[in-house]
Image (cartoon, grey):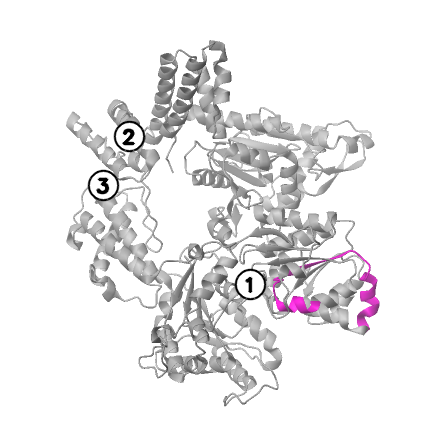
Amino acid sequence: MGHTSEYAVENMFIDRLESLGYQFVKMNSYDDVLENFRTQLAKFNEKKLAEKGHAASFSDAEFNRIMIHVDNHSVYESAKILRDKFVLELDNGESVYIEFFSADTERNLYQVTHQVTMDKAHKDDVVYKNRYDVTVLINGLPVVQIELKRPGVEINEAINQINRYRKFSFKGLFRYLQLFVVSNSVQTKYFCNENEMVDGQYNPILKSLVFFWTDEKNVRINDLNTFTGEFFRKTALTEMLDKYMVIKSTEPILMVMRPYQIYAVKAAKKRVLEVNQNGYVFACTGSGKTLTSFKLAQLLRDEARIDLVVFLIDRKDLDDQTVDEYNSFEKDCVDNTDSTSTLIQRLKSSGEKMIVTTIQKMANAVKNPKYAPVMDTYRDKKVVFIIDECHRSQFGKMHGQIQKHFTKANYIGFTGTPIFEKNKGADGRTTADIFHAGDKLDSCLHKYMIKDAIADGNVLRFSVEYQRTIFARNLAAKGIDPEQLDDPEYCKRHKIDMSQLYHDDKRIETIAKHIFEHHEQHVHPQGKDVYTALFAVDSIQTLGKYYDEFKKLNEQVPADKKLKVAAIFSYQANEDMDDGSDEHSQELLERCMDEYNGLYGTAFKLDTFDAYRKDIAKRLKQKDLPQVDILLVVNMFLTGFDAKPLNTLYLDKNLIWHSLVQAYSRTNRVDKMTKQFGQIVTYRNIKQWQDDALTLFSGDGDPNEYLLENYDYYLNQWMNQEPVLRKTAPDVDTAGQLKSEDEIRMFIIAFRSMAKTLATLKTFSKFNWDDLAVVMDENEYEGFKSWYLYYKDQTQKQNPAVPVPVDVDFDIELVRTDRINVVYILNLLKNAKSHAKTEEEKQQDVDLILREIERSDNESLRLKKDVMREFILSRFYELPDDVDVMEAFEQFEKEQMQADMEAFAFENQIDYIIVSELFSGYVFSGTISEDEIRKRLTTYQLGLLKMTKLTKAVKAFVEDTYKKYRAEGE
């Protein structure tokens, strides 16, 4: 599709904004932006100025004082100024509070403009001249920038363009941009602005922080027309800027909330304020519950009807990073002491309406008589409790005490694994029971499940390895299948106690050795970044056995091969010693702590256990180094603990329902590119329990959606990819003899696919080069890899020895499959004009293009075959040397498309303008109705049969033309 269509999309977008109440204003340069800001700001503050006997305008001196206040600040500082007031000294000697933005939609002045040019002539710190697509302004300040691309163009191109503008030309008032929207009409995303420089380095906005908009059911709203109606309603945009953005208080970061977070907050707020009931939010572990719940607490705190908001978290989750995270949202908001009296002092303070504290301290404050004078003052007040990880039993136990004391309280819970009927505990209560919302309301306020989070890229999938460790050959018992002895449900049905076998010293020794031998491939994927691991076992006694086995294994290897193994658990002071253990749990913990101190140069004792726990957490998160390589646990750290660098969970314990999903979810936080999934290595057969749990917590979805395939699947994939590589280069020597760009490209793509499969295979414990060597051994693979890296090096040289393709990705650590598209094909032709071509050579070029198109699995690209052939034969070889081939092709497409429309209009004896406008409407909205077509054709006074036939023909032509000319560029 050519430039005209993109321009038409822009105009229709502006028309849509005008229909929503935005005023269009024409602006060409930064001078126009300044003049408009001066006018609009005065108009917005008209009432306050009038109270001071001042007209709704600013003198040069007054506006200069305003510009001194607002200009030349970072994006972060500008965001704070936008939401603050400014004391302006007027020329008449009076002072007035000037506002720049209001939460009241009726007060703000909403405008839209387009094609504003920023250059050095108008703003001296602009580096390069840029012209922006569409800008939304509130009270004269640019607050949202929209970049539009042709339908089908990869949306990342618009993100890259905005990053370029941020670096080179978003200066002055454009530093007040809060949000960006990018769209190609059929895909639309939004994201938040950030400081373009951090610590002297350019700070591009990451594509992982660019979000789709959705409805309340988490269904994406992709097309620009529908998105505009939802996102750019004046009330919606104002709320987004006022309520659903976060300006961190301890670091210069802006954040915008994602749709599911906003819907959850709205639903919870409505439940408390409008119906005075309770409820809980079901939000997948790792999806940002902390921000969601904290923002809810802030918004409720600001409500006059609410007397107090108490944000409750479990004491064991309150490590330093968690405290820092809460305090970054609002400085010094966390009560981080162990003293209940500190909580009481804060409750005495009439100025504090929001308190972040632990469940344990609040429970103590409620039941301890000495705190009654303070606690009783809140008995009849409107108090809202927001509970993080509300599925936990700790909250269930204290719920009755709190409920009895706070007679007018509301309770809003957040959990990634609610308690349902299937997984409820001994007390028989579900999460819905605890957060009961009356007989007519659903206790669950909003759902964002693991399937939604994986689809959005907010968490990773899981790779699960099942390692069988118990085998039986000759059984005395009749009717027992030895192959099913690792199935706990089978053993339960047949009354077989496997406990003794699970805890056999030889089995534990074998598993420890297996972990030790294969740990490197799990936590050091692709030989680049290093991650950390948890090992969860079923008892403290078992933990002690594994700890000692790892200690023995470490003694047998050189220093650089030793693993840093730590252990942590809670114990009972008066535990039963009749289980055959030679060591009390307290003694074991003291021994583990002493050896930890020797390893890390610390000095922890039992009475500083909490500091020990926090230190371990830091090392698992790589906040303190050296890191903990493997942490042995029984129950601790398996829920509520977030560590992006943790990627592996070893299991030798049975887990079910929420405990299983919570434990798995320690591993699947999104981190560096080399972390592709959370790895689970289980030495017990928990597959059925796993599938049941994933099904339950994904709304009865398919559990396999969240899991990688098994080792044999990827081994088979390797076998299938090998002949593809050998087709491009039968052996290593041939790989070094490739001459043409096409041959090299095919080799790069084929090798990269095998490299990606190998990277996944290497994460499995059973990985063995012998399995792969059936078709290609390690030495031959390394030979092919050497040529792959050689071609990579050639791309970085000014005068490469071989014609390496410029548009392929050489990332050796993370391999991405190439996509054959228009840009890809046109790049094949970049060097094609190095000399005059004979007709035969031209035909060879055409054949190459057609061959590339035919081997593409991109159906849209196949429709371009004829257009590209015509472009090459009739236009390509006449282009000047300095012309951008992509732009030339776009221009050619535009002309061809117009010619097709003119031909269709002439053949059917209708006006070309009708066809063009119907087509533009389809591009913008994504739909075209026969009724709409008939209305445009009524002037031709056709009979029913002819009208029906022509209507269908027009509709088919519009849809086919869109498919044919939809761009496939990156």
Residue position for label 2 = 865
Residue position for label 1 = 422
User: x and y percent of residue 33 in the render?
Assistant: 60, 29
User: x and y percent of residue 943 in the render?
Assistant: 45, 11
Q: Nearer the viewer, residue 648 or 197?
A: 648
Q: Is residue 260 above or below residue 369?
A: above
The residue range painted magenta reads 370-398
User: x and y percent of residue 203 in the render?
Assistant: 49, 48
Q: Which mark is residue 141?
A: none
Q: Is residue 259 above or below residue 115?
A: below
Does dot 1 land on a helix, a strand or a loop? loop
Quadrant in the picture for the N terminus: top left
Residue position for label 3 = 742
Q: Nearer the viewer, residue 93 or 728?
A: 728
Q: Of the residues tagged 2 and 1, which is closer to the observer?
A: 1
Q: Nearer the viewer, residue 725 or 350?
A: 725
